[in-house]
Amino acid sequence: MAKKVDFLIVGSGIAGLSYALKVAPFGKVYMITKANEDESNTKYAQGGIAAVMYQPDSYEKHIKDTLIAGDGICNEEVVRMVITESTERIHELIEWGANFDKTETGEYDLAKEGGHSEHRILHHKDNTGFEIERALLAAVHKHPNIEILDHHFAIDILTQHHLGIEVNSKTPGIECYGAYVLNLHTKEIETILARITLMATGGAGNVYSTTTNPSIATGDGVSMVYRAKGQVEGMEFYQFHPTSLYNPGEKPSFLISEAVRGLGGVLKTIDGKEFMHKYDPRGSLAPRDIVARAIDNEMKIRGEDFVYLDCRHLNKEEVIKHFPNIYQKCLSMGIDMLQDYIPVVPAAHYMCGGIKVDKKGRSSIQNLYAIGECSSTGLHGANRLASNSLLEAVVYAHHAAHDSIEKIKFVSHCENIPDWDAEGTHHPEEMVLLTQTLREVQAIMTYYVGIVRSDLRLQRAFDRLEILYKENEALYLKTTISPKLCELRNLINVAYIIIKHARARKESRGLHYTVNYPR
Ligand code: FAD
Ligand code: SIN
């Protein structure tokens, strides 16, 4: 028996939660989330959220910095919209209960990160995302119209395809009717019919071997929409954060926030020499694509596995006040960041592309919205400016919610969707078929589709992935559905799209750097 709801939200990070709070007065909301309700990329965000708060900063300066980082392919209209609404959305987050650090004079304490020309990052120590997630969840729990269904895994969105009508990417008017969802408490696959569906599933860092993203980041939303023949764009632009703590085997990789470099931390090679000025006059605080590529280059030239971040000259009180978690984490590994160098390496961090949406968060599929990291709005272009993603999520939650509230008046439930058919599937005999395939996907992506690419590497990646794709699709058809199986399928899909988009871009731009088409 299908469940029916007005708004179905997939994902409980900043994007899903802030949208939920806005649409809840207008209908019943189910928020499904595949793990514990707070598990998300949002929870791990450290540096903060970018917004224009005081002079001498201005919207024009923040717009200019965003456009420069995006390397010429941001949608300027979108950039203007997001940034000019930043102050208002921050005040809303504060009203919902999020706390940001203040100075002794009572103003917000604004930090600086790579590519920003002014101090404009609002933060809560070095765990801003944790604080935002806490506040939004508390607000959502108070709303009688919102029901959070944790440990519910969205498998696929429902479209005309499930009514037996064939659709392809050229079919006009593909419609979304909700989703098939695996209830991990009962192990049943439920049909959830919704009048409006929101995809807020976050990123896909686990497509690479080393990532700052938690294990939930497997590109499920992008993959579901791609399978449903919705438009996905910009996936060649996968952002690597320059400074994750070098600790082989630790998953996810622990982030050393860019704000540490904002306070004066300097990158050095293992022999203690600064190197960033060889690559960019902004040194250690150049935009991320430049810093990550410079580190990658130095490591390759020197045959070393990491570089150092030097914070020994920084003020002890300031470091402990602003970065208590980073300080403690380093100490737990025997590194006192005020006396010792911190070993760091780049790690996959943020998916700049995703489900193509318009300024209202509408995807190419009717009644399906996408916001947050799984979406591609045009804000980031070829490279995201630090701390612009939390901002993008709240601005688009606002626009998508307003549009959804209008749209839902004209949408009714689809009645004829059949229940999930598990006929002929069995439990997997060997989990190694999944775990080893995942490692292979991650290795292909890391070595052939990482920070530096080439036509030959992309061709190899494509050929090898095709074998894994075929093997896994065959397995999928005969295996009982589980999150691990679906996540692997989704990661293979995401890897395929990244490679396809990377091969189509015959130039180096922003995060997509290829030796065949250097700048
Ligand atoms: P998420 O917060 O990732 O939420 C996705 C949700 O979808 C989760 O609840 C997940 O369980 C759920 N989900 C996924 N698939 C399914 C499925 N199939 N079924 C059901 N549920 C599903 N950005 C900044 O702006 N500033 C920062 O300082 C910053 N620091 C960062 C530090 C780290 C370590 C990381 C990893 C990211 C950081 N980012 C930062 C990026 C930012 O945190 C994310 O882009 C943002 O939080 C994404 O929010 P979201 O709501 O779109 O997705
Ligand atoms: C960081 O704190 O360095 C992460 C900021 C971001 O990803 O925007």
Image (cartoon, rainbow, N blue to C red):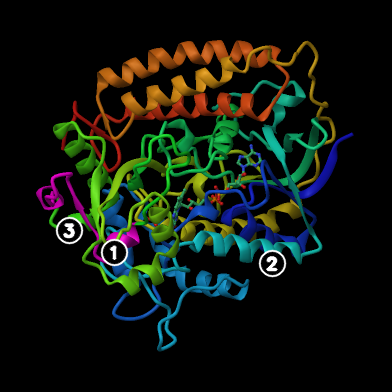
SS state under label 3: loop
Q: Residues within 10 Å of mark 3 (few under 14, many from 20)?
A: few
SS state under label 2: helix
Q: Residue furthest bottom?
A: 105
Q: Is residue 290 left or right of residue 446?
A: left
Q: Horizontal and vertical percent for residue 208?
A: 42, 32
Question: Cα distance, mark 1 to mark 2?
Answer: 32 Å
**Image point (31%, 58%), residue name:** 337
Q: Which mark is residue 17?
A: none
Mark 1 lies on residue? 262
Question: Cα distance, mark 3 to mark 2?
Answer: 41 Å
Mark 3 lies on residue? 282
Q: Earlier in the sequence, mark 1 or mark 3?
A: 1
SS state under label 1: helix
Q: Using the rendered image of the protein, determine whether residue 17 is visible from the camera's viewpoint.
A: yes
Q: Amino acid at mark 1?
A: Gly
Mark 2 lies on residue? 139
Q: Amino acid at mark 3?
A: Arg
**Magenta stretch, residue numbers:** 258-279
Q: Is residue 223 left or right of residue 160?
A: left
Screen quadrant of the C terminus: top left
Q: Amino acid at mark 2?
A: Ala
Q: Earlier in the sequence, mark 1 or mark 2?
A: 2
Does ligand 1 reach within 8 Å of label 2's beta carbon?
A: no
Quarter of the image where one finds residue 363? top right
Quarter of the image where one finds residue 33? top right
Front residue (pair 86, 270): 270
In the rendered image, residue 170 lying in the magenta stretch gets the answer: no
**Image point (32%, 31%), residue name:** 450
